[in-house]
Amino acid sequence: MDAVQEPLGLVAEETLDPPDWADVQALSHQVIDDAVDYLRDIRDRPVWREMPADVREAFAAPLPRSPAPLDAVYGEVSRTVMSYPMGNIHPRFWSWYMGSSNFTGALGDFLAAIQGSNLGGGNHAAGLMDGQVVNWCKEMLGFPASAGGTLVSGGSMANIIGLTVARNVKAGIDVREHGVAAIEKPLRFYGSDQIHSCHRKAMEALGLGNRALRRIPTDAGLRIDIAALRAAISEDRAAGFKPACVIGTAGTVNTGAIDDLQALARLAHEEGLWFHIDGCIGALIAIAPENAHRVAGIEWADSVALDPHKWLHAPFEVGCALVRDAAAHRRTFAVTPEYLESTPRGLASGEWLHDYGLQTSRGFRALKVWMALKEHGVEKFGRLIDQNIAQAFYLAGLIEAEPLLELAALPTINIACFRYQPGLAGEALKALNTEIMLRLQEQGIAALSDTTVHGEHWLRVAITNHRTRRTDLDLLVRETVRLGHEIAPQGAASS
């Protein structure tokens, strides 16, 4: 065999660390200063604005082959990304149900990225903090300390975690070994006709199919009809299906309606069904002193999905799934290959957090939640939830006092649906209000969304923002009426 040839000269080894840490430190101070200014002056900027062509073209640039100075890289980010945000941290962003972040949480995300821990598990501080934040979520919702739980990307994944455990517990077979095709009787899951679309995705991902999720009619308040649910369960049993799980909604996306969680818990117990609650909108109302009664019964669930990046205002993304039966939770996901076996001491002696979900690699999501809770205390977050709910009722009062505005119904929690009504109907009325919504966005005034309530089109204001003030809602009403006056002749002409 030929001898291995020695290199003629040493090859310089490289790193991603900067050649001069002082330069990076100076730029980092500038980034932090800019970040403080960005949040401090948020009200001085439009909620949203369209990107000009040259900015949009920047995102079509080819793969960089050679280096660029870091200050130039940051300059491009500042000009493009930071200048054209989605807008959800702005006090007048009410389009979708999103939190508005907070500076302390952003620092937590930065520190988590600097530390760089993988939260798949192991014996290290970040892993313990992850478990601590999950325990705090249990405490906030009144779940037992013995329950299982995991931090995930958001509500959709949190719901999938809970529903996967429900499927495996109620299947009657070892689904992990034999698959859903071996289930003797097709499983049925139940939720209201207002249920979030992520539950359909969950049914599809779990191999059960969309038809496994039966949508139950709702009452005048858009809460699940308990009598209709009970009848559907009986009908399905008679038809050879196996009712497995009831999904209660603690705050629908359209209107914020909250199902009767106590009645659902009793029904699930009587019928031998798993009781899952989609609490991504309203579970954290449990910490709000004036409104906690609205989610009474959430502590009786078998599993709950909640979103700290909504009413705990953590920077995106962080959701949480809680499962009352911790052993069933772990049995649903745990796998132990030889390269991830525990050791009696050392780094691998800590708990493997990936045993409670689908991700082996997990980001350090806990720190941003932990830091903000430590700084402000949970009681302040509860008061902010009460504040948002009170603001929705304040907005409803403004709408009712304005002859040209129409309220769909009194808010249940922090979502108000309304429209400008100059005497139009049908598609003409929808077109008018859609145009108002778009102009509010394009003029940087406010970001609203629209939806359908009881078969009719409405504008929707979801107030999940610690920066919102009642003066912002006063402005919304004034500007809606102003735009309605501007557009109404066009709307009338199209009727």
Image (tube, rainbow, N blue to C red):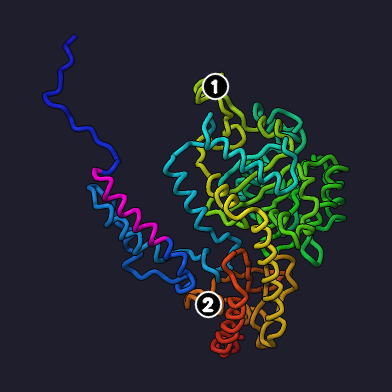
Q: Quadrant of the N terminus?
A: top left
Tell me the chief SS of the magenta region.
helix
Where is residue 358 drawn, in percent x and y? 57, 37
Q: Which residues are magenta?
A: 19-35
Q: Is residue 136 toward the left or the right of residue 441 in the image?
A: right
Q: How many marks?
A: 2
Tell whether position 24 is magenta. Answer: yes
Q: CA distance from mark 2 to mark 1?
A: 56 Å
Tell whether position 16 is magenta. Answer: no
Give the secondary structure at mark 2.
helix
Q: Amino acid under label 2? A: Leu
Which residue is found at the position 36% from the left and 64% from the top? 56
Q: Is residue 356 toward the left or the right of residue 288 in the image?
A: left
- The image's mark for residue 341 is 1
Dot 2 corresponds to which residue?
440
Q: Quadrant of the C terminus?
A: bottom right
Which residue is found at the position 52% from the left and 64% from the top? 89
> Which is more N-terminal, label 1 or label 2?
1
User: Residue 250 occupies which quadrant of the picture?
Assistant: bottom right
User: Residue 3 occupies which quadrant of the picture?
Assistant: top left
Where is residue 361 drawn, in percent x and y? 50, 36
Which residue is found at the position 49% from the left and 72% from the top? 43
Instruction: Determine crowd level at label 2: few under 14, some 14-19, many 20+ residues with C-alpha closer than 10 A.
Output: many
